[in-house]
Structure formats: structure tokens, C-alpha cells
Amino acid sequence: MKKLAWVAFLLCLLQQTYAQEKTDTWLEQLLRTNASPFLLNVLNKPDSFQYQFIYTEINRDKNNRPQLKNHYLHVDRNRYFNPASMVKMPVAFAALEKLHQLQVPGLDKYTPMLTDSAFERQTCVTTDTLAANGLPSVAQYIRKIFLISDNDAYNRLYEFTGQQTLNEKLCQKGYKDSRITRRFVTMTEEQNRHTNPIRFMQGDKTIYSQPAAYSTVSFDFSKKILVGNAHYNRDDSLINAPMDFTTHNNVPLEDFQQLLQSVIFPQSVPARQRFDLTKEDYRFLYQYMSELPRESHFPHYDTTEYFDSYTKFFFFKAGRGAIPSYIRAFNKTGWSYGFLTDVTYIVDFKNKVEFMLSGVIYVNSDGVLNDDKYDYETIGYPFFKEMGHIIYQYELKRKRKYTPDLTNFRMDYIDK
């Protein structure tokens, strides 16, 4: 009897472990049937590459309303990956929401935004040489975030939104496993709780002043998060121990998928999950989530460095060729510490195809973090390209009851 009870207990544990991970047999079979030997090798090593993948199938009804269905491969919200620049996406959404909710006459995303300093390691920003008017603004920061994943732009919107407001809003919207705790600059946890004073200007007149703030939000750091076998610290010294990510930013892949969905298809999620945005805000986000660096003049970028697929991983990044004009990816990517992430909504206007893809992979064969020796080019980017290509080919053949009207996502990319 004791032996039977022990077996039952073990089976219960196995079921609990399995329940944490989502895998659709159909999706796995589709990918494996069409995979190259390279991709099969990656798919056969889920523990080594720690990949997670979500394919979101989209079907329209007769009124063009989208119905979305997620298909999963090794998706586990309890498996940590470093989100890197992915956190810039919800911060951009939250900054626009905050502007709208302030309801200050004359204040919008184009209003010049001047950042001051009031605490150690904080810095000021009063000009932007890449802006048409030479001044920073929420709009300009969001452009930079989606066009080339600019770190300073994220830091400034993190400061405007505030650590406490940002995390409380995410929690209220149902993202209880997500936290955004830090800027992308070397700071302590305490320094990241302090955010800068900010002024919004109309000529020489301040129309809104936000004082320096301190976040008292409580984070649950009880679960230790260690990655790798060794790492280089801030002094470039090799430490023969895993890197500690316990207090870092953390957002599950499913949450990123839902965050993007809430902006691309706001009516498809519960009202509490939507950001409080205007119609013009949505159009603005669609513009810059899908615009290519070569199409932008303010800011203007060197396209030898910032090529078409610089921030487009799924079926584009492995190679620097031009993206077909009839395909647009509305997305955000992240890359750091050997982790690559992309969450995207793909539209093919010529073939009337639309779908969402969300994925992450860990490509760090030597197990050392911060050594800048990651397998992005040889494994990571080819993984995203082939996974995207397989789903795209499936979508081209998939029968739909109603052809989608994709007019809402056609943008005028002639720079303003």
C-alpha cells in the first residue's frame, strides 16, 4: 500500500509539472513534418534551447470581427527568460495611457518632454537631435523604441510612467506574474525605484510638471532565478557561478502575446486588459510597430546598420534582404544574455493572410553570460526564420470561411 501511495504521489507530481507546460500535439507535428534537419535538432532539445512558441490563429466572422486561438509549444509561464527589450512594448503602451488619463489641456504625445534629475545616477534630457523640432517627446521615444529598440527611449518612458504606476497597472490588467523593475542602465534596485522630475512644455511655458517619484511597490523575489554556468560581472571579471536574475524584469511569453493582442485587437480581450488609448494612439502604434528604419526620416537611421529586419526576427532576420512590401510585421523583439524573443502580428496584404507568432529561445552554448559569445546568427535567428516560414506556408493554404478585411492595418509610411 505504501508503494502504491508513493507511485500515486509521483504521478501527481508529474501531472502537476506537465500541467505547467502547454504543448499542442497538432502544432508540434506541423512543425516537425516541415522542419529542416537544423530545426529538428533544435526542436529535439527543448531543455538546452529553452524555446517557447505560440502560434495564434485568426479567423474573421462575417462582420470582420477576429476570433483568435492560441496553439502552444513548450510554453511555461514559470520558466524564466530574460525579456530584454521586450519590456519596452508595455512601457510604451502605458506611457500613452498615462498621457490620455492625465487630461491636461494641450498635453499629448507630441508635446516636448524635458527630463531633469533629482537622485544619484539620474541624467537629464532636454534636446533630441533626431527629432524634427530638436526636442524629445513621448511620440519620439516610442518611434525609437519600435524602429530600432532604443534603450534611452525606454528609460525615459519608464521614468515618465513610474515604476509603481507601471507595475500596478500591469497587475490591474491581469498580468500578475509580470514585473518591470529596472531601466537599461547600471543602477541598484533602490536607484531604479527613484524616477526623475519631468516637465512638458508649450514654448517657454510648463503645461505639466511631474515631480520626482519613489516607488513603494512590493515585488516577490522569493523565487531564486539563476542562469548559466558562469558570467562576467560589471568589472569584467569572470565569476564561475550562474548569473542571478532574481530581481530583473520578468514577463512570461503568454503575457507578451496578450499585451500585443490587446493593442492589435482590443475588442478581443476583456475590457480590464485594454489600455486606455485613443483611436489616433492605436494608429500611431500600428505605424511604428510596422515601419522599417529606412522609411523613417525623424529619426533618420543608417540603414547599413539598421536594415529592414533589424528588429524583425520571424522569417526575416536570418539575412539582410528587403522585406516584401506587401508583408508587414507589427512587433517587438528583445535580445540579451543569449535570449532572443519576438512577439509579432504578421499581415500579408496580397494574399489576405494574418496571424500572430510569439517565441523565445536561449542560444548560449558555452554557458557563460556577458561574454558576448552567443549563438544568435547560427541558431537563434535561423530558428525564428524557419518557424515563421512554416507557419506562413501553412497560413497561405489554410481555408477561411471569410476573407479578412485588413484595411485597418494599412499605413502611410511617408514620414511626417
Image (tube, grey):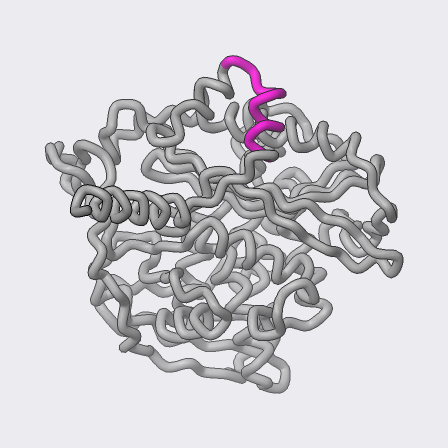
Q: Is residue 390 above or below residue 268?
A: above
Residue 222 picture quarter: bottom left
Residue at 56 percent across and 15 percent down: it is 36
The image quarter containing residue 379 is: top left
226 displayed left or right of 306: left
Query: Which image quarter holds the C terminus?
Result: bottom right
Q: Position of residue 328 (x, y in %)?
A: 71, 41
Using residue 269 as the reference point, say whether residue 45 is left or right of it.
Answer: left
Q: Position of residue 382 (x, y in %)?
A: 52, 23
- 347 in magenta: no
Q: Give, as a single range, the part of the protein colored magenta.
A: 27-37
Total marks placed = 0
Task: Say left or right for 407 vs 30.
Answer: right
State whether residue 300 appears in this view. no
Residue nearer the viewer, 280 or 73: 73
Vertically, is 302 above or below 226?
above
Identity of the residue drawn at 58% across and 54% down: 143
Q: Nearer the viewer, residue 205 or 368?
A: 368
Question: 45 and 336: which one is in front?
Answer: 45
Residue at the image point whose x is 38% and y is 30% from the top: 49
Asked whether, in this view, residue 186 is left or right of residue 75, the answer is left
- As for residue 35 lying within the magenta part, the answer is yes
Magenta span: helix, strand or loop, mainly? helix
- Say whether residue 131 is visible: yes
**Residue 295 place in picture, x, y as percent:** 69, 42
- Between 50 and 298, the one lying in front of the other is 50
Q: Residue at x 63, y 65 (%)?
A: 269
Q: Residue furthest top?
A: 37
